[in-house]
Amino acid sequence: MPKEFNTEPAFAIEEDLNDPIASFKSSFHFPKHNGKDAIYFCGNSLGLQPKSIEAAIRIELDSWRERAVGGYFTGTNPWLYYHETLSNSLSKIVGASAKEITVTNTLTVNLHLMLLSFYQPNKTRYKILMEAGAFPSDQYAVETIVKHFGLDPADAIIEIAPLTGEKILNNADILKTIEHHGSSIAMVLMGGINYYTGQFYELEKIAFATHQIGAICGFDLAHVVGNIPLQLHEWNIDFAVWCSYKYLNAGPGAVGGIYIHERWANNIDTPRLGGWWGNDEKDRFKMEKGFHPKPDASGWNISTTPVFNMIGLKASLEIFDLAGILEIRNKSIRLTNYLEYLLNQLPNLAFEIISPLSYENRGAQLSLYFKENGRPIHDKMKENGIIVDYREPGVIRVAPAPLYCSFQDVYQFYCILKEHF
Ligand SMILES: *Cc1c(COP(=O)(O)O)cnc(C)c1O
């Protein structure tokens, strides 16, 4: 660590002064508390609204009003290609070529589409390995796809759980379990970060172990994209999906993203459900028989680009382009480490950090299990204009998203705990 932390208020002020991306805080709207900006630690659920979104919406409203159908081909952002600029920005964030990325639909829908492309069970190889306690929507998607193929979820789904007495998955155990089930596994499908514990899995090693047994490796990156920089292509991951309303700040229900490794994306014979927006543009409007998918990830697009559901993402990615995902991650590591340090200076507080204790294995989130006072702590935070997430039995998830949370925000959180508990 370049400089040790301490519990002085002046330390937080100095950290903010030295923070190269501190100015981006003013690019966002904050919910208000007693007329002042609240402190927002819920960016892992719904990111804040970038101020630039209103102007970006106005551009498309103007284009629609002035050009109507012409807006597909002309104007500031011709709608026919609207998703392509988004793929360029996302390629830096997820570490893949723009051709391996497309933005379309929403997360769970995209997960189903990827399952239909990449889950091809046969008599001996039909199991899906996933994490126990995966986000419910992912569990439902896998349960229903398995049933769709006439299989029994109790047999076809393998869930990997933490070792006895532990809260997070053991990395070596994940790899061992993959190897153990070997050729019965058709697909390994994990969250990149577990939404509850905040554990960031070793994606590259999981992909390698999965390919060793001849299976497909996919990830749900809802809690990772915009939080931790990735190298999806280099790590040889087959496919991934994510939403844009958490760390990407694109707004509630915003368009989701898909990554498909070029070895699948370039191959027009890779199975998929087709629609005209995945068809080559040059004969899209000929309205002829025969689906000719584009030879890249956009060949999975189905419907007309939902432009008004993409504007938030466009505006938000412009902020990511300016700040840079590596700078964002650098600040994030220091900010979350600082939060961890401060919490550990509170001897009277009975709590456990259920997130991984090493920064390499987590993003911007610490999940804190308060053995007592979980609910009162949450309520006291709220009273003081600090928004955090609470889950029974006593788990508070704190996510200091680095684009709009400061060291002084984290210090405030500490002060309230110190003063009242
Ligand atoms: C947030 C989240 C979802 C939500 O899916 P939607 O289809 O966007 O509602 C699904 N899975 C995971 C892992 C999530 O974190």
Image (cartoon, rainbow, N blue to C red):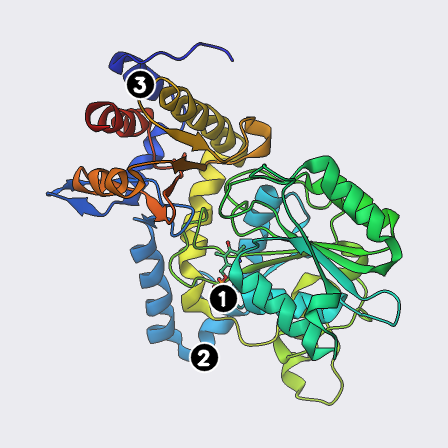
**Residue 75, position in %: x, y?**
44, 65
Q: Are marks 2 and 1 in contact (CB under 8 Å)?
A: no
**36 vs 324, nearest the viewer:** 36
Q: Is residue 17 visible?
A: yes
Disc 1 target residue: 78
Residue type at the position of mark 1: Pro
Q: Residue at x 31, y 18 (%)?
A: 12
Specify the amino acid type for callout 3. Ala
Is residue 234 visible in the rendered image? The answer is: no
Q: Amino acid at mark 2?
A: Val
- Give residue 356's position: percent from left, percent from top: 55, 32
Q: Which mark is residue 69?
A: 2
Q: Is residue 409 above or below residue 2?
A: below
Q: Earlier in the sequence, mark 3 or mark 2?
A: 3
Q: CA distance from mark 3 to mark 2?
A: 52 Å
Residue that numbered label 3 is attached to: 12
**Residue 352 at x, y percent in the picture:** 44, 31
Horizontal arrangement in the rendering, residue 258 relative to residue 338 (left or right): right
Of residues 171 and 226, the one nearer the viewer is: 171
Label 2 vs 1, first from the N-terminus: 2
Residue at figure coordinates x 86%, y 71% from the top left: 122
Label 3 C-beta lies within 8 Å of the nearest ligand 1 atom: no
Task: Mark 3 vs mark 2: give the one in front.
Answer: 3
Residue in the picture at 46% in, 76% down = 70
Cβ of mark 1 under 8 Å from ligand 1: the answer is no
For mark 2, does the 10 Å Cα neighbourhood hold few (<14), some (14 to 19), or many (20 or more) residues? few
Q: Earlier in the sequence, mark 1 or mark 3?
A: 3
| Residue 119 quadrant | bottom right
Q: Secondary structure at mark 2?
A: helix
